[in-house]
Amino acid sequence: MSEQDPLVIFTPSGKRGRFPAGTPVLHAARSLGVDLDSVCGGRGICSKCQITPSYGDFSKHGVTVHDDALSEWNKVEQRYEDKRGLKPGRRLGCQAQILRDVVIDVPAESQVHKQVIRKRADTRAIVMDPATRLYFVEVLEPDMHEPSGDFERIAAALADQWKINGLIADLSMMAKLQPVLRKGKWQVTLAVHHDHTGAAPRLVEIWPGLHESGLYGLAIDLGSTTIAAHLTDLETGEVKAASGLMNPQIRFGEDLMSRVSYVMMNPGGDREMTRAVREALSQLAMELAAEADISPDLIVEAVVVCNPVMHHLFLGIDPVELGQAPFALATSSSMSLAMAELDITSINPRARGYILPCIAGHVGADAAAVALSEAPEKSEDLVLIIDVGTNAEILLGNTTRVLACSSPTGPAFEGAQISSGQRAAPGAIERVEIDPDTKEPRFRVIGSDIWSDDPAFAEAVGASGITGICGSGIIEAVAEMRMAGILDASGLIGSASQTGTPRCIAEGRTHSYVLHDATADNGPLISVTQGDIRAIQLAKSALYAGARLLMDEMGVDKVDRIVLAGAFGAHISSKHAMVLGMIPDAPLNKVSSAGNAAGTGARIALCNIAARKAIEANVSKITKVETAIAPAFQEHFVSANAIPHATAPFPELARIVTLPAVSFNSGGEDGGGRTRRGRRRG
Amino acid sequence: MSEQDPLVIFTPSGKRGRFPAGTPVLHAARSLGVDLDSVCGGRGICSKCQITPSYGDFSKHGVTVHDDALSEWNKVEQRYEDKRGLKPGRRLGCQAQILRDVVIDVPAESQVHKQVIRKRADTRAIVMDPATRLYFVEVLEPDMHEPSGDFERIAAALADQWKINGLIADLSMMAKLQPVLRKGKWQVTLAVHHDHTGAAPRLVEIWPGLHESGLYGLAIDLGSTTIAAHLTDLETGEVKAASGLMNPQIRFGEDLMSRVSYVMMNPGGDREMTRAVREALSQLAMELAAEADISPDLIVEAVVVCNPVMHHLFLGIDPVELGQAPFALATSSSMSLAMAELDITSINPRARGYILPCIAGHVGADAAAVALSEAPEKSEDLVLIIDVGTNAEILLGNTTRVLACSSPTGPAFEGAQISSGQRAAPGAIERVEIDPDTKEPRFRVIGSDIWSDDPAFAEAVGASGITGICGSGIIEAVAEMRMAGILDASGLIGSASQTGTPRCIAEGRTHSYVLHDATADNGPLISVTQGDIRAIQLAKSALYAGARLLMDEMGVDKVDRIVLAGAFGAHISSKHAMVLGMIPDAPLNKVSSAGNAAGTGARIALCNIAARKAIEANVSKITKVETAIAPAFQEHFVSANAIPHATAPFPELARIVTLPAVSFNSGGEDGGGRTRRGRRRG
């Protein structure tokens, strides 16, 4: 290039250079390292390299762009315009040639490393850099005088046309090459998986001609109680479908330790559980593909996060060692493998899987995923991150140090072990308010924005449209009952006479509070029982004790901010969580909700291979704290049983929480929770 | 080390060095790079490091070795001696310490890179350097305060104790670690596969404590007609069991092109054939393990050689492209994969497979294996190597250049398509002589060294112990018939009156020659029919034409030497092959037999990973000649039909071959072979 050559300036990157007149824009962009996409390699068939030339006077760039700065609209562009249409002002970067000085904008959708739009403003951007990408290649035809295999000629084409060397392929891929190459007349699109592990690039799929139906991946959060997955577009990062189902392992035990016990009592029982979870995941993948209306074969990747017991059960490893000290994992590193090895057969048969590393025997890949999503190691503030689930993952840290533990909260927060509990789904009560004077409740159910005391509610939802109460609903209900004086500090529900509301009904020697009675219409009676309160107390004590244990370890007695996460984390009300004593005290405006942070972490790892590398490095720096053997955990657990403070420590909470000093404990009921119950039995 | 330190000299390597008094011999050997084996890493439990100190005056080395040159016999050695016994004079290298100047011999069995004894003196030595080896390690116990996975601690132990970094393992291995580590009390033996491909070392098996039952591999020659396998000890290279069976694909077509046609006519038929060959191989592996009395789980590797069609059918790739120009292979490179991917499930579930590269669409991994075994590229003489089989692999070359082709000989040479033909097995006639005067035959059968005209034959074999005629037998029979004047140059068998022997009996319009008639005892009638002669003529013409084609390409009309190979290659008589016109003329003492060279090549690749690398490099240098499209091949084929020369070109052959100028062609029989038959039909 010389001083006489036209100057080209790309926006938004600002990269600039001079190229001989006639240079295609795509070529110039590649020379300058401008992020301009192309699947077909400049052959004018994929249209990924669309750009927008700007004309006029660009004094800040010191150039004036004339109308004839680029070559004229050509036949290839016209064909594309006729067939699919181009947005106004757009050109194909591989066709338009630079003739005079020009300013060229690369729109977001033409960038390979696009930023993915995330809902929360406070989260880090996800930049697209997935492991699997598409490459269009022209393959040499076989020549019997220079014999070489079809695969070897594909690999040579990829090396020559895309500078990707050392392609490998599984056996099942080899069997597929010949017909596709011939159908595509030696022009094919390759899906190549090339991740951060240093493994050779691997051919996972091949299509004749230009493949235009996209590539997809699954971000999977394998929880003890629920399995959630996001079907994600690997080009744009967009979530095309999201769904969840109950973990079928629940029939072997509601919490992790009961499942480990099941294996101890039933040798080989782990294989049943492995099969159950794998089948469920295959099913879920198929449903998601149907929902997004794509062929399941287009799902070529999956990232899985889960706690250690689920990790072992999913991988087909006996989890018994995880049930006893020293809680030794069979393997703790991240894994990169074929999803077919995990019997996930409903997706592409060569789909690759990535499983995040486990932090310790009790702190799994799900905690690693939360760390990836919430990045405590980058926080200047001391942040407490609580991923609420059947097993809670708790992280505490800042740029100096990050601690992690897990706490066996049980499934109560997910609506299990609750008398009217159900999974968060339409019909479930998710928000509850109780008037402290009348003790009358009002609520909202999932699927409607109308409160139950609104006249429009009956028509919108109807008495029979209320099916149960979900995790966030039970948390609000219990907290509201406490604030309305229906519950005393020990967690005991008062009788109708003690509370002054007929909604407190006797059930055996204890009482329940009726939220909704549709029995007259053969509908359900939805109430909060004393047993429900006890289950929530155990769960929240475990959560609180875990958080306190990390705070002890860190040597602090308060944190700067709290992030609540979980499959249903987005729906937890911070106020109610704090009233309940689920989380340590903090200014209410410093408690935020991160939604399904583990699932988000999985999605980040799915979209960006550098994130995989980063979390693998970070995991080794996280200090693991073992709750199961820490005496302090037991102490915190016991002392956290009450539903707390008559006076709240922070002004904004004090305004909300005006807890009555009621006590309904008449000595006849086991109001003391687990410890007292233990004592009485002994 | 200093001048005052004792000098240690190792034999046979001659390596020497000075070490501080008290240095264990194993340590000194390792420092000097002396090839001294150890599986347990010097813990005194594997006994692989046995050495023999020499005492006395070694003037050639300039040292005198005193009785106290090594430390005294210790408890560990005594324990081993009591338990297993040591050969006289032997010490354990890890226990005996160097105290004064000493000469130490490393016996062959204590060397890692042992030379394998091969039967033929003219072949290159195989030096043991297999991909899979055993390593004893002590693994750190899990510590909940420093959590890490069992696998990660195994990998760390291997890196620390054996300097082997970056261990990987399949999922099924992960599931096996925990019980074995605990059973072995954190001492385990690992089988680690680390080949020439640059792939990470892979854990394929683990045993508690020291594993002493060895490691085995299979060298497999997948022929069109027969499948042969050698079960080989991966420490010594010794063949522990060898066996073969008929390729069950024969029911889909006797030769390769009929199998390709079967797939063309029956879409999906390739899958049936794939299943058939894989099942047969699984079965064969199991039988070999039983024969060698080892657990099939100890078979951790296999090397497979085969022609391109078998290659594709075994790998599950449709072979149809190989049936038509340009004969494009789906993949031509070598492959390294899990045998389980090939459904070979009777051996270790994590056993690794290596498949040699194919040279071209008609010249397969079997030809590559022959090249590996016979190394034409290292021959100063121009050598013609013919691997006789249903598809013959032919190589011609020397240090300057190597050419290769294959020729579709059909299964006649393997006893198929022959009226009394059978596989080479006890009872098969393998050697034949016919008296030129009396026209009486005598023969030998496999399993006995006694000729049929020996009085002891009846008792040793008996008339009913003769079951048929194998490939080498039919070659000798036809050549002897020609030399005895029973057959004319066109291949026509004379009548009893024409030949003067009642052994020539009429069968329809042609005649057969009776080798053995046991019909009186309800036994078989074993004869050579006119059809048999025609089958052999077609086969040998194809073989000869292929060899001539390579000679044309090389621009020569004779070769310096000929090597005959094949599953039954060891048994072919050079003289008879030349009489038959199977091979070009050459001095008889320049025709040698290489046995199953393809199988040997597989065994070399199994025992030595450098050989794999070498053949991969060589294959790319071999010039492929395509017989199917060469007009010259057809010309050679037609002109090679006769059973040759009335006068042999070489004196030694002339002495043997005094062919009568008989002709039995009366015009009524199609004595002209394919060409004349064609003409008559036209």
Image (cartoon, coloured by chain):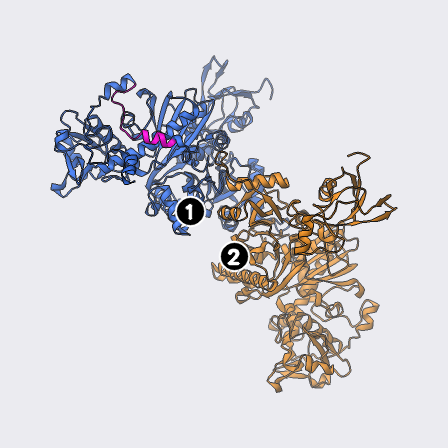
Chain colours: A blue, B orange
**Secondary element type, mark 2:** loop
Residue linked to disc 1: A344
Q: Is residue B40 magenta?
A: no
Q: Nearer the viewer, mark 1 or mark 2?
A: 2
Number of numbered discs visible in the structure rendering: 2
The image shows residue A278 at horizontal and vertical percentages of 40, 47
Q: CA distance from mark 1 to mark 2?
A: 21 Å
Of residues A564 and B194, the one nearer the viewer is A564
Q: Quadrant of residue B504?
A: bottom right
Which stretch did the figure color magenta?
A633-649
Q: State which chain disc 2 sits on.
A: B
Answer left or right for B501 relative to A57.
right
**Secondary element type, mark 1:** loop
Of residues A47 and B282, the one nearer the viewer is B282
Q: Quadrant of residue A447?
A: top left
Residue linked to disc 2: B345
Q: State which chain disc 1 sits on.
A: A
Kindly identify which numbered label has been placed on residue A319.
none
